[in-house]
Image: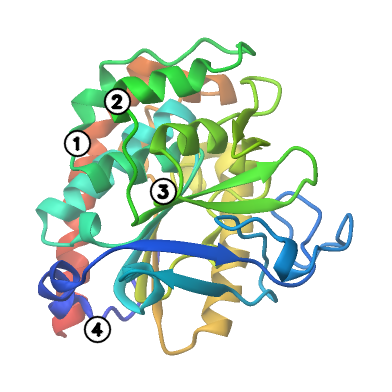
Amino acid sequence: MQRSGALSAIGGWVEGARSRSTGRVRWRGRGPAPGGAGSVGATPRRTARPPSTRARGHVSRHEHITREVEPDGHAAILDRHPLAMVYGGGGAFGIGYAAGVAHGLADGGIPVAASPALGTSAGSWVASVVALGLSYDVVASLEPPSVPNLRPGRLAGLAREIFGESRHPLVSVAAVSVRTGRRHILSGDRHSLADLVAASSAVPGLLAPHRVDGRLYVDGGVWSTTSVDAAAHAESVIVVAPLAGPHMGLMGRGAGILLERELRTWRRRHPTRSITMIRPNRESAAFAGSGPLSLFDGGRARAVYSPAYEQGRVWAERLSLAATA
């Protein structure tokens, strides 16, 4: 069941978000990290390093880990924002779906581009596209790589055709360290967006791991399809989850159960804030195909954008009405 939450802060989103300055940010994680994909409170594989030895720009945490933020300049991501976006994974289909929803929300008055965004796998592409103000046509012009394709640099090369060497302080992505198996949250203020999306989208066995700052990373979806617990500090959070929901078949039902568990944990920890999950309706899900590899079909990704955009517009109106009720 989709939930809109009590988004009472929507009325001040646009002016509030536009008036905030942005800058550089560095993060450190603290405490033990879990050791399973998508797990909550799983047994750690090894003891976490002390905060003083952790590389800056990386965060490894779960629901019990405290985030420390060191400002460098006027870092908007340090403050509590009116809104934060979370974009989940889902292959090329997920990029088309989440981009459509995001652009529909934006055209409906929700300031998604002015809000901090966390992307996982496909969602990392969407967070970057939205932050840079790019149209989906830019992404749709590229043909997704055939899989398996373990040639190093393939994803990064595609990403640089779109993003070049751009960075953006409002973008962060989830990726999993090959060496430790821990999730890291990588900042678009510290690294190029092309490197971030290549790391966050490197599906194990299908696409080669990508190296960022000396570390090899694979797809953040190995840990969680959305990493909701790592969302930026905000009054309201919108989660776009391309893989979740009953219309996505067995895969979607499984992803939906895990995501609902993460949302319950988030709500328990933040009882005064609201979170909204947007997932494919029947019209959008029809383009997903019948198997996991269908998610990498560029034609399906392009086809789902329009119904997803319309879904985003509907959600924008729904959220606006909830805010003014």
Residue type of the residue flagged with mark 2: Ile
Horizontally, is 43 left or right of 166 in the view?
right
Mark 1 or mark 2, which is nearer the start of the sequence? 1
Q: Secondary structure at mark 2?
A: helix
- Judged left or right of residue 158, residue 198 is right
Q: What's the distance in space between the residues labelled 1 and 4, CA to CA? A: 29 Å
179 horizontally vs 234: left or right? right
Could you tell which of marks 1 and 3 lies nearer the N-terminus? 1
How many labels, in total?
4
Query: What's the CA distance linking mark 1 and mark 3?
Result: 16 Å
Mark 3 burial class by Cα count in 10 Å: few <14, some 14-19, many 20+: many
Q: Mark 2 sits on what residue?
A: 162
Query: Which residue carries the number 1 mark?
Result: 134
Q: Nearer the viewer, mark 1 or mark 3?
A: 3
> Residue at the location (35% across, 46% down)?
127
Q: Nearer the viewer, residue 196 or 287?
A: 196
Residue 294's x, y, as percent?
50, 20
Q: Which amino acid lies under the numbered mark 1 shown in the image of this protein?
A: Leu
Residue at numbered disc 4: 8
Of the residues tagged 4 and 3, which is closer to the observer? 3
Q: Is residue 238 above or below residue 183?
A: below
Query: What's the distance in space between the residues labelled 2 and 1, CA to CA?
Result: 9 Å
Could you classify mark 1 by the number of other residues whose Cα lies within 10 Å: few (under 14), some (14-19), or many (20 or more)?
some
Task: Work out whether mark 1 precedes mark 4 in sequence or the reverse, and give the earlier one.
Answer: 4
Residue denoted by label 3: 188
Question: Rounded to the nearest whole Å, what is the CA distance between mark 4 and mark 2?
Answer: 36 Å
Q: Are marks 2 and 1 in contact (CB under 8 Å)?
A: yes
Q: Is residue 302 visible?
A: no
